Amino acid sequence: MQENYNAGLFSRKSVLGKIFVYLSTAMKKRIILAVFLAAAMLGQAAGQSRAFRLGQWTEIGNAILKELNASYVDSLPLERMHQAGIQAMLEQLDPYTVYIPEEENEDLQLMIAKTYGGIGAIIYKPEKDGNVIINEPYAGSPAVRGGLQCGDEIIEIDGVSVKGLETKECSDRMKGKPGTTVRFKVKRVRGGAVEDVAIVRERIHLPDIEYAQMLDDTTGYILQTGFTDNVSGELRNAVNRLKAKGMKRLILDLRSNGGGLLHEAVGIVSLFVPKGSLVVTQKGKDSTKGLEYRTTLEPIDTSLPLYILVNGATASSSEIVSGALQDLDRATILGSRTYGKGLVQSIRPLPYNGQLKVTTAKYYTPSGRCVQAIDYSHRDKDGSVGHIPDSLTHEFKTAGGRIVRDGGGITPDIELTLPHYSRLVYALVYGGIIEQYVLKYVREHDSIPAAEDFRFTDYDDFVSFAKEKDFDYRSSAKTLFDQMRKELEEDGVADGMKSELDALEKAIEMDKEQFLRLKKDEIVPFIEEEIAVRYWYQEAGVKIRLRYDSQLKEALGKI
């Protein structure tokens, strides 16, 4: 049984993204959907059977497409209409039920299994007519073994110039069947020599256990970022390694973990509770019947103090783990309330090698609660859905008699302060300013100390770089002020308040360099992490992140 990995929110690339464009650009597709829905409602009004209505709906839809193909004045964009019709239909359900056409199967595998055939590197293409830059190679990957490093520029892929190609086109050319060879023409970051490089593609698997180390003499820490196949076995091995190092308590970090395979969640819970313990109940179309999942393996430790970190992006299988261990009074949950995804998805094959990822059930923790926070089955007149209010949630009891509630994710036993970042930090990160600067840094520095010893000390250089870049550096206060002034102008009252508005604007206005220097303490950790990753790979980035992790430090003070 497979669950959605990103809970509809957390992947870099959404399978829906490309399809959604079609919806937003063609009114005729909405007409097709309206006809389809009208046909279904007519059938329902006549009291006909579900099977008959489905046949009627299909017949009418096919007839419309055939008539349009035969009679419409212009040529039809049939593929786009087909995609848009399917997507519009599925939009009436939940965001996790999606159609994946054959050409997007590789993206599906990356999403649900975190695997793909390729060389193992993140690329960056600053402009369409420029070269592809190796931005972040994975440790031990074919890219690294082939001699590629951060800052190298790819000029050609298999004899085809990358100029004029989009980033995705370049990425698709680099991916391929494991065992096949891809040939690059590369301009080296060190010295600028142009060389031919051949790399044999492999099956790349992005690890779910990104980090597992001791924080001090007795506290083990494991960062888990997914729930792909055998992560429970990997976690078992990691726990045993840490116990061998003297671990007396464990912190399992599931923050921003969007979930994955249901059976792996069961496997992880089984590491810490007696064999035969109930982990989760799954209820599908017939809600009176439930499929129970119990632990089937012997645990490795049922008394090791266990602490789980969660946040608002902790979803799906992560909520099964944290919810089950909370209900069984086996772990202390710390952080902020989780996302609230209590739905299970399955993958169903479709004709022409397409696939349907469909919601087939809801899941319930051992106490009987469902954490689903949004009710997609009841929509407002405008089609929108809302969170289930606290007043409509219900009380349940853990094995030890503590009260927990359903309908709103997992509420932690200990609340931790949410980290706050200024609007400027978001602008620098999502605007690519930090990424661009890091590539400049790599070109100018052959090496850096190990992650444990590395400190970024060239902040003046970063300020000089960033202040010349075009990005929205306004503070949150200035953004709100600009919006207020615009609305006052629209209301026709701004002129009468001009002097007061001008004075307020002058008081909150900061130039770019001034604001960059003011937020140095917020910005440096992001630069430091990105630099460390380029030289010492992904684990180094985790080490830097933990150095500045205020929530983790707060948790250590409370456990």
Image (cartoon, helix red, strand yellow):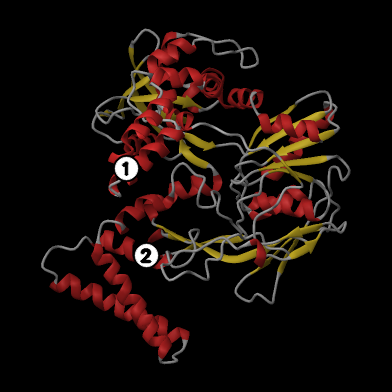
Residue at x-position 41% and y-position 23% = 510
Outermost residue, left side: 73
Judge from the rendering whether residue 22 lies leftward or rightward of residue 248; answer left or right.
left
Residue 268, percent from left and from top: 73, 47
Q: What numbered label is drawn on residue 471?
A: none
The amino acid pointed to by label 1 is Lys
Judge from the rendering whether residue 187 lies leftward or rightward of residue 316; answer left or right.
left
**Residue 113 in view, yes or no:** yes
Q: Callout 1: 10 Å neighbours few (<14), some, many (20+)?
A: few
Judge from the rendering whether residue 28 lies leftward or rightward of residue 210; answer left or right.
left
Judge from the rendering whether residue 541 lies leftward or rightward of residue 415; answer left or right.
left
Q: Earlier in the sequence, mark 2 or mark 1?
A: 2
Quarter of the image for the N terminus: give it.
bottom right
Q: What numbered label is drawn on residue 88?
A: 2
Question: Which image quadrant is residue 409 in?
Answer: bottom right
Q: Which residue is mark 1?
A: 486
Question: Which image quadrant is residue 370 in?
Answer: bottom right
Outermost residue, front side: 496
